[in-house]
Amino acid sequence: MADYTPRLKASYNEVVRPAMKEEFAYKNDMMIPKITKITLNMGIGETVNDSKKIRSAVADMASISGQQPVITKAKKNLLLVSVFVKKCLWVVKSHCVAIKCTISLID
């Protein structure tokens, strides 16, 4: 298990870093930017009244990220009007509007 490297990290080290060093003409490997964290965000504004859809979105995000996401709630009452869709959405304070998950990378 000690020699396991995630696919994204391996791809970054093998493909992206050499390409960045060549494209931006970095003289030193320490000048190449590192990925320190990855933030995933999913807006669930349409599902504010349906708890099953919220739980489904949380389960999907958990399966993608490998950890439990945080449900963000509206901080104040809002009336969202969409001219293109011809639809109004009333968002009440403390309704679930999105879920987020931050993956911190060590190394």
Image (cartoon, grey):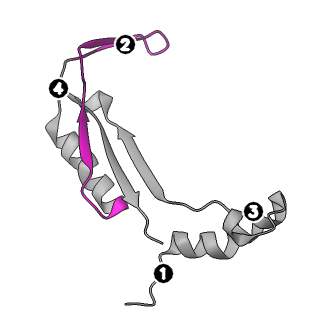
Residue 94 is marked as: 4
Q: Amino acid at mark 2?
A: Lys
Q: Amino acid at mark 1?
A: Thr
Toward the viewer: 96 or 39? 39
Ranked by sequence position, the earlier of labels 4 and 2 is 2
Disc 1 marks which residue?
A: 5
What element does badge 1 sit on? loop
Which residue is at a point 48% across and 72% down the rendered structure image? 107
Up-down relation of residue 102 to residue 44 (above or below): below
Ranked by sequence position, the earlier of labels 1 and 3 is 1
Q: Amino acid at mark 4?
A: Ser
- Expressed as whole percent of the image width and height from the top left, the position of residue 54 reads 22, 41
**Distance from Cα at disc 1 to Cα at disc 2:** 47 Å
3 and 2 marks in contact (CB < 8 Å): no
**Distance from Cα at disc 4 to Cα at disc 2:** 21 Å
Task: Please give the range of residues in magenta.
Answer: 65-91
Quarter assignment of residue 34: bottom right
**Distance from Cα at disc 1 to Cα at disc 3:** 21 Å
- Residue 84 on the magenta segment: yes
- Residue 67 on the magenta segment: yes
**Which circle, 1 or 3, is nearer the viewer?**
3
What element does badge 4 sit on? loop
**Distance from Cα at disc 3 to Cα at disc 2:** 45 Å
